[in-house]
């Protein structure tokens, strides 16, 4: 399969929990990784593998997986978490990188 | 600290070839990793273009494969992108990136990106 599908936009109240999802057949056999992108900046990896955070990423970010869906959860969303979030994985051949279409997160 | 910097023309004419170079500092390309090119049209999402290993082994996005060539110059610690027969649809910010040590297909070091506009 060669697609990852994300909701275009999600909103969350300040301090509340939000889940951003990513669907794709490739996720049945691989984990989604997640990157955060703020306007005018390059993406920043926030979650990779089963549920791993690069150094410096707050522990309010976590990842999970079920069936063909990967999820990024932000527990206690902060104003600075407002950004675009992209999932990515590889296709069924294992030789091509896939990106989801991105989810714009608004923190109210 | 690993740093990547894209360079190349910011304006390319339709039907011509887009050429960009990524210069890496703080890490030797010869030491490993599949180094990647990713682009982002204005207001749109990320699209993987392709990746190259220091040996020259490449993976390309099937939708771009016929027009893309990625090469590496380990002596200069650089890798390059060529995209031929460009159209306005190739206008985008182009990023070079290095993947995380645990997986070649997710990236944790990115260049700042360079905007390439295709226009006559």
Image: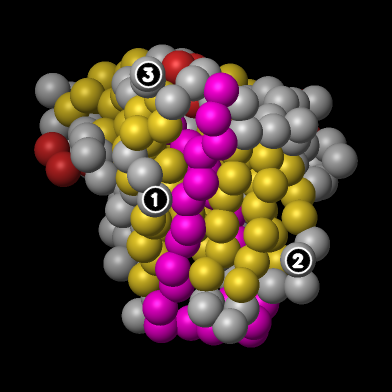
The quarter holding residue A40 reads top left
Q: Which residue sits at x=52%, y=70%?
A: B78
Q: Which residue sits at x=62%, y=33%?
A: B84
The residue labelled by disc 3 is B120
Residue B38 in picture, x, y percent from top left: 52, 43
| Distance (Cα) linking label 3 and label 1 | 17 Å
Mark nearer the viewer, 3 or 2:
3
Contact between marks 3 and 1 (CB within 8 A): the answer is no
Q: Which mark is residue B25?
A: none
Mark 1 surroundings: few (<14), some (14-19) or many (≥20) residues within 10 A: some
Residue A16 in picture, x, y percent from top left: 23, 32
The residue labelled by disc 2 is B56
Residue A104 in picture, x, y percent from top left: 32, 24
Give SS at disc 3. Answer: loop
Q: Is residue B67 left or right of residue B77?
A: right
Q: Is residue A11 left or right of residue B79?
A: left
Chain identifier of the residue bearing label 1 in the image: B
The stretch drawn in magenta includes residue B24: yes
> Could you tell me which quadrant the C terminus of chain A lies in?
top left
Q: Earlier in the sequence, mark 3 or mark 2?
A: 2
Q: Earlier in the sequence, mark 2 or mark 1?
A: 1
Q: Check chain identity for marks 3 and 2: say if they share one.
A: yes
The residue labelled by disc 1 is B8
Q: Which residues are magenta?
A: B15-40
Chain identifier of the residue bearing label 2 in the image: B
Q: Which residue sits at x=30%, y=67%?
A: A56
Residue situated in front as seen by the camera: B110 or B10: B10
Give SS at disc 2. Answer: loop
Q: Is residue B112 above or below residue A17?
A: below
């Amino acid at each position: 399969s060669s697609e990852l599908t994300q909701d275009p936009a999600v909103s969350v109240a300040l301090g509340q929990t939000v889940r951003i999802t990513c669907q794709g057949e490739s996720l049945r056999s691989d984990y989604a990784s997640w990157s955060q992108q703020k306007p005018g900046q390059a993406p920043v990896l926030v979650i990779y593998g089963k549920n791993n955070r690069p150094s410096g990423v707050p522990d309010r970010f976590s990842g999970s997986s079920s069936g063909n869906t990967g999820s990024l959860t932000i527990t206690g969303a902060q104003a600075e978490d407002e950004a675009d979030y992209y999932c990515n994985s590889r296709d069924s051949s294992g030789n091509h990188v896939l990106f989801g279409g991105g989810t714009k997160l608004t923190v109210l | 600290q690993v740093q990547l910097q894209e360079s190349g023309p910011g304006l390319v004419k339709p039907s011509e070839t887009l050429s960009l170079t990524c210069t890496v500092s703080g890490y030797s390309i010869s030491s490993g990793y599949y180094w990647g090119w990713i682009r982002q049209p204005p207001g749109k999402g990320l699209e993987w273009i392709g990746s190259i290993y220091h040996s020259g082994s490449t993976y390309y996005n099937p939708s771009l494969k016929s027009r893309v060539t990625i090469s590496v110059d380990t002596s200069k610690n650089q890798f390059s992108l060529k995209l031929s027969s460009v159209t306005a649809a190739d206008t985008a910010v182009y990023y070079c990136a290095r993947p995380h040590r645990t997986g070649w297909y997710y990236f944790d070091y990115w260049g700042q990106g360079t905007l390439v506009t295709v226009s006559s």
